[in-house]
Amino acid sequence: MKFQNTAILSLGSNMGDRLANLQWAINAIHAKIATVTAVSGIYENPAFGFEGDDFYNCAITVHTSKSARELLNALLTAELEGGRVRSATERHTSRTIDIDIISFNNEVIEEEHLHIPHPRMQQRNFVLLPMRDIAHDWIHPVLNKDVNALIAQSGDTNRCDLVMQLPAPFAGMQPHTFNYIAIEGNIGAGKTTLAGKISEDFNAKLILERFADNAFLPKFYKDQARYAFSLEMSFLADRYQQLSDDLAQFDLFRDFVVADYHIFKSLIFSKVTLGEDEYRLYRKLFDIMYKEMRKPGLYVYLYQSTDRLLHHIRMRGRSYEQDIKGDYLESINQGYLDYIKSQTGLNVLIIDVTDRDFVNSQEDYIWLLEQINAKVTR
C-alpha cells in the first residue's frame, strides 16, 4: 500500500544570496507543501541559455499526497513568495529561485505546462549530478536509462562543481530512536495513514492491522449483542498472530518498525462491547497473550473528538461503519484514556489532533512529527 507520491525536484538560484535562497526554498517546501526526505549537494554552474551570474543548483526528494498538478501549483506559489519574477518575453532569465518537477513516481505526464519527466533533464548535468546524489538508481521511464547513463550521454560540457552539502530538514528528527512505534486511535482517527506516512518518510518497516476480511465485523455493527464476543475473540487471535509473526521478522534493536495498532486495543474495545462475564473470561485470555508480546518503544494515541471521528467515518464511506453511533465512539475514547492512565510500563504520547488535518495539511503533519520527536529528548 502506497500512502504518498514521490517526486524529485530541481532547485536553482543565481540572484542575491544563492545559498540562502535554496535553503529558504527547501524549508518552505518542507513546512508547507511536501515532506523533503533527501537533499543533494549544492552544485555551481554557468547560466544556461543566457548571460547571467553562475547558478547554485540542488535536487530534493519529496513525499506528497498532492497530485502532480497540485504540486506544480504549490511550487509556483512558493517561487513567487521567494521573489521569482517571470518574464513575459524571455524564457531564460536570472532568478532568485527556480523549482522544477523532474520526476513524479514513475509516471509520464504530458499536459499543458506540466511535462514529466522534465523534457530537457537528460541534457543538463546541473540537474543530473544533484539527482544522482539522492536517486542514483532512478530509471528514466521513457528513455529507460539510469542517471549514470544519462550523465555519460548528456553532451553537457559546462562546468558543474560540487560546492557543499546542505542538511535535510529531517536531520534533527529521530523517531527511529524508539525502534518500534505503535500508533493508535479511535475508529477514523487516521492512525493507518499516519503510520504509512511515517514509514515512507523515515524508511521504516510498516505493520498494518488486517481487519477488512473479518467476517464478524459487518454482523457486529448490525447486531452488537449477538456477535460481540465472537468479534472480539477473532480480533484478539488475529492481532496476536499477526504481531507475533511480523515482529519476529525484525531485529527491534536495529530495525525501525511502525505499526498502526497495538494488541491492547483488543482490551479497550472488548470492555465496551462485552458483558461482564464475557469480559472477565476475555481478560484472562488477553493477559496471557499480552505477557508474551513485545512492547513498543513509543505508544502514540491520536485523540479526536467524537464529531470529528463521525465526519471522517462518513467521508471514507465504509458501508458497515455508517451506523456507528457517537456514544459508542465516546466510550472507546474514554476506554483508551482510562487504560493508558493505568499503564506504568508503557511509554505513551497522547496527541490531540481534533483540529489538525495531517493528511492534507503539510504544516499539521510536520507539527505532529515534532510532537513525536520532542518525546525523544524528554
Image (cartoon, rainbow, N blue to C red):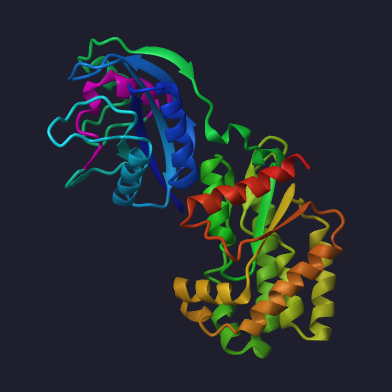
Residue at the spot x=79%, y=62% of the render?
289
Image location (x, y in percent) of residue 81: 37, 40
Vertical placement of 238 versus 175: above or below? below
Q: Quadrant of residue 130?
A: top left
Magenta residues span: 114-137
Picture residue at 79% right of the left edge, 75% below the top: 282
- Quadrant (top left, top right, bottom left, bottom right) of the C terminus: top right
User: Looking at the picture, how far across and down is residue 260, in whole percent?
Assistant: 61, 57
Q: Nearer the viewer, residue 334 or 353?
A: 353
Q: Position of residue 45 (x, y in %)?
A: 31, 14
Vertical relation: 353 (above or below) 310: above
Is residue 267 in sight in this rendering? no
Residue 219 located within the stretch drawn in magenta: no
Which residue occupies 39% across, 28% down?
Answer: 59
The image quarter in which residue 231 lies: bottom right
Q: Is residue 351 above or below residue 112?
A: below
